[in-house]
Amino acid sequence: MKQKQFEAEHADLWNEITAILQNKTHEAAPQLPALYRRLCQCLALAGQRGYSPLLTGYLQRLVSDCHRHLYGAAAERPQTLRDWLLQEMPRQVRREWRLLLLALVGFWGVALALGWLVWVKPHWAYAFMSPQQLQDFQAMYQPGKMNLGRGGSESDVMMFGFYIWNNVSIGFRTFAAGLFGGIPALLSIVFNGMHLGVVASWLGKDPATRETFSAFVITHASFEVTGLLLSGLAGMRLGLSLIAPGRLTRRHALLSAARAMFPVIVGAAMLTVLAAFVEAFWSASGNISVEVKYVVGTICWIAVIAFFSLAGRAGR
């Protein structure tokens, strides 16, 4: 069938659907599903017969408009990200409570154990970090050094970019490493916990750096550590789906795990960016008192824990 004959035969159908979509005809609206099926058939025939791109493009747009009208996709789309973050993400994290517990033990367990070891026997710090690294940390957190090299708002923006690069790279490596059976993601979490425990204990032993360090990290750490743990959790779940796919093929198990973990990794990315913003414009500022940083940091930790404990429980 030639294209002109095809257009003449189905023009009434296309015009009728267009009129319904434009709210010009209300009586035929209940018939739209049946008309939509005929329209999809027209699009399939136009593509199969090689009709002009102008015609197939017109039919494709009409099919898309009709689909949105029937299924309300356009009305729901703006709420997708909000639902992911406020509903599905905390639910999914609670569903994976075993992996979350493993990540918490890997990070905080190692941090507290090594922190206690270095606090009791400081020379053990040299087993995990070089003397030059420990000396650099002590010099960095000396009182009065917080604003050193910070030339105002322009420098703050530059540091914001540096923190984003650093934090996102750590989170991405932790997530991506989880594809190799989940073990590398857990090792990344353990390594970061080791680093925090040794540095925090080493600087905490020195009265000159104790307050400077704790006031600096308390606020942004609530978002940065949570983002790291969520990245590791998502990576471990993807890795485990390849090791133990169950009754699915490994490909389908990986796809299923990826869909389930997508809200989690989106939340981890947003928390990581938020941590970089807070670290650049709040934590590193010497114009904010230590007491205020402690109060705000405590509130942030309580808010993060409460969110992942309570959010999404009242929803579907």
Image (cartoon, grey):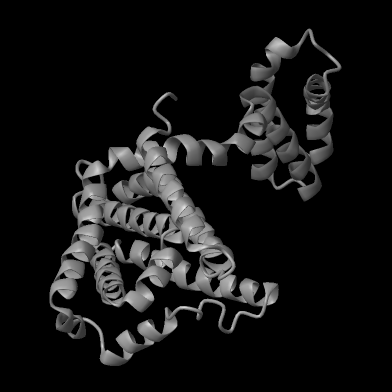
Q: Nearer the viewer, residue 67 or 110?
A: 110
* Location of residue 135 with respect to 119 vertically, above or below: below
Q: Is residue 75 visible?
A: yes
Q: Is residue 181 visible?
A: no
Q: Nearer the viewer, residue 106 or 238?
A: 106
* Location of residue 309 with respect to 31 vertically, above or below: below
Relative horizontal placement of residue 30, taking residue 162 as reference (left or right)? right
Q: Quadrant of residue 304?
A: top left
Q: Residue visible at 59% across and 65% down?
A: 281
Position of residue 43 measured from the top left corner of the image (x, y, whole percent): 68, 36
Q: Residue visible at 52% across and 76% down?
A: 146
Q: Nearer the viewer, residue 96 or 64?
A: 96
Name of the residue lying farthest toward the bottom = 132
Q: Nearer the viewer, residue 135 or 313?
A: 135
* Location of residue 118 with respect to 178 vertically, above or below: below
Position of residue 167 measured from the top left corner of the image (x, y, whole percent): 45, 68
